Structures are given as C-alpha cells and as structure tokens.
Amino acid sequence: FYRDEFTARSAAVRVRFGAGIRKAVAEEIKALGASRALILTTPQQAAMADEFAALCGPAAIGRFTGATMHTPVDVSEQATALARELGADVLVSVGGGSTTGLGKAIALRTDLPQIVVPTTYAGSEATGILGQTENGVKTTLTSPAVQPELILYDAELVTSLPVGMTVTSALNAMAHAAEGLYARDRSPLSSLMAVEGMRAFRDSLPTVMSRPDDVAARGQTLYGAWLCGTVLGQVGMALHHKLCHTLGGSFDLPHAETHAVILPHALAFNAKAVPDLLAPVSELFGHDNPGLGLWHFARDAGAPLALRDLGLKESDLDRAADLASANPYWNPRAVTREGIRGVLGAAWAGNEPA
Ligand code: NAD
C-alpha cells in the first residue's frame, strides 16, 4: 500500500474494546472529567437507555430516546435544549448511526464530549462526519467538533441485531473500506485498515449469521466496523456512495439495504479502471472480478440483491441515472450517464455484476 506521496490523518479518539466493556462507562465519564451524562437512544432501544442509566449510576441525569433516521434538525434542537436544561456535561450515545448522528448534532451545538456505544456496524462513531436533514434536504459536514471522544465496542450489545440488519449493516461498513481502497486521498494506513476490516467481516459474518449470539464472532464484526468506519473518517468516497445517496435521498430507499445491493455493482464498474487497487478485494472474496466475489459473499449471507426488492420501480431507473450523473464528482473511472444506467439496471434486476 506504499505510495510515493501521501497525507495521513488520524483523530484523537480513545477506543475500548471487549465483551462487557459497557460496564466501564461510569469510570470513563469520570476520566473525561464529567459527571452529568445525557443518554441517547432510539425509541426502539429505550430499554438500552434504562440499562445505561443503571451503569452510569448517579452520573445519569437524563435520557432522550427520540433519535431517528437522517438526523432531522428539529429533533437535534429538542435534544440540545434538554441537554442545556439539564446541565449535561457529557453525551452517552447507545445505538446505531441514527443515535450517533444525534449525539454529533448535539455536540456540534454545545461542544459536549461524546461517549459512543455502537450497536450496529455503520461506523459513524469513528468519523467526524455528520449528515443532517431539514425540510427534506440532507446536508453533510465534516468537523472535529462532531468527532466522538470515546468509543466503547461491546460485542454483547450487537448480539441483538437482527440477522437481516446484521448482513446489510456489515455490507454498509464494507462499502466504506472498499471505496477507501481507491480513494484519491488514501494513505498506506487507510488501505491497511480497509483490507483488515473487510477480512474481519469475511471471516466472522458467516458464523454470526448462523449463531447471532456468538459473542466472539460478533467481536470480530465490531472490529471490522471500527476499521471500516475509521477509513470512512479518513478518506473521500466515490461512485458507490453517490449512487446510494441518490437512491436514499430521492427515492427513499432504505440506507443499509441499498448499500448492500449497490456495492458489488459499483466495485465491478470501478474495477475496470483500477483492478490493481481492488485486487485485495478479489483476493479476499476469491474472484478476479471483486464485485462478483462480493456479490457471491452477499448472496451466501442472505443479503438483498435487487433494488426492485427494495421498492424501486423499473420506470424510476432513468430518472435515477439522470440524478446520479447530474453533478460531476471524482471517481476512479469516468462516470457517464450510460455507465450509471448500466450499474443501476443490473442492481435493479439483481443480476450478477459483469
Ligand atoms: P440505525 O441507527 O437507524 O438503526 C436502525 C434500527 O435498528 C433502529 O431502530 C435502532 O434502534 C435499531 N437497532 C440498532 N442496533 C440494534 C441492536 N443491536 N439490536 C436491535 N436493534 C437495533 O441504523 P444504522 O444503519 O446503524 O445507521 C444509519 C444512519 O447512520 C444513516 O442515517 C446514515 O446516514 C448514518 N451514518 C452516518 C455515518 C457518518 O459517519 N456520519 C456513517 C455511517 C452511517
């Protein structure tokens, strides 16, 4: 992965890893010099807020269980008002990317430190990126102000992730690593992490699919999530992410499922331009075409394979191709409307990527 010239960035993040490590949350709050924690979750994970309130002890001064998809600004402002009213001095975000997003949005407005306890593989906890929506428009910013200070990766908390979400969330994470391999601003470190992150998922996902409560295998998947999320925080993304952004934003397709379907096709498309950079993916998944290798892996893991199964109509494909090719962006292979239409058509039908 050596390059003649590169710039490497890394954030000042403390990471603790281990089954049961959530029990260290009270001591970590203290270590941050804090004593008034606001606990954040989604409504679906409200029971998790109760567990964390108990773990935080007297430092738990409140909870907000209204985190939701796409980090709507009105929800963030409501939660920020609660944090101010309670005099919170630290945020404890327990959940997936939606909950982490809410914590980041509050941190942006208050500069409060964040402890994140991830329960999916999305990887947001490892980045300084925040996507927010207001009046149906999603904007993304990158700032050290939203980068969480501490991550507690506890494999016991992902055993409850349903099998379907497990596989789509894993592929969502792997997409960050895969696109990281050809990013213009990649460094030897980001590429090493990308390959190791994908390897961790390749080795552990089949076990997790058959034994969802296997804590050792879940630990491996969380390790993959950390590495893939860290890659996302360090380098820029390309075709795959732009396509998913268009499909999610304009056609309301579900986030992680869309990533799972598009990734093999986007990689097959880009592999024609940068086969050498994607060779590690070919090696990991045992096909000369890295997209095809990943497609087989996804299929064997029971991932969705077709956009039509996610609710996209065939008649939407042309508009999707128009939208996805309207604003030019960097990609290792020239992005044409025709090329994008081809990728979308194959992904819609669920064909093997060519
Ligand atoms: P999510 O956080 O929306 O979670 C989906 C649902 O699963 C929620 O109801 C949640 O409560 C539930 N859930 C989460 N963990 C669970 C568990 N262990 N057991 C049972 N239920 C559980 O989904 P996500 O895929 O983690 O996050 C997606 C969001 O994160 C998107 O909005 C995406 O844009 C954002 N994201 C941001 C970044 C970034 O760097 N800013 C990175 C990745 C994803």
Image (cartoon, rainbow, N blue to C red):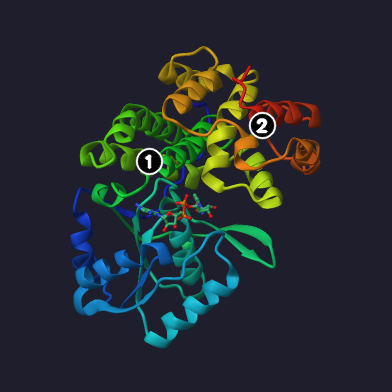
- Residue 204 location (% of width, % of height): 31, 31
Q: Quadrant of residue 89?
A: bottom left
| 41 sits to left or right of 23 | right
The yes-or-no answer for disc 2 within 8 Å of ligand 1 is no
**Residue 2 visible in the snapshot:** no
- Residue 74 location (% of width, % of height): 58, 74
Q: In the displayed orientation, state which residue is furthest to the top.
A: 288
**Residue 78 visible in the snapshot:** yes
- Front one among 55 and 304: 304
- Front one among 32 and 37: 37
* Residue shown at 38% from the left, 58% from the top: 95
* Residue 25 sits above or below residue 122 on the image: below
Q: What is the crowding at mark 1: few (fewer than 14 residues within 10 Å), some, or many (at least 20)?
A: some
- Residue 40 location (% of width, % of height): 39, 69
Quadrant, the N terminus: top left
Residue under numbered circle 1 = 163
The image's mark for residue 348 is 2
* Residue shown at 48% from the left, 78% from the top: 80
The amino acid type, in three-letter code, at marker 2 is Trp
Mark 1: which secondary structure? Answer: helix
The yes-or-no answer for disc 1 within 8 Å of ligand 1 is no
The amino acid type, in three-letter code, at marker 1 is Val
Q: What is the crowding at mark 2: few (fewer than 14 residues within 10 Å), some, or many (at least 20)?
A: many
Q: Whole-Å distance between the Cαs marked 1 and 2?
A: 23 Å
- Front one among 12 and 170: 170
- Front one among 109 and 267: 267
Reading the chain from its start, which is encountered first: label 1 or label 2?
1
Mark 2: which secondary structure? Answer: helix
* Residue shown at 69% from the left, 63% from the top: 136
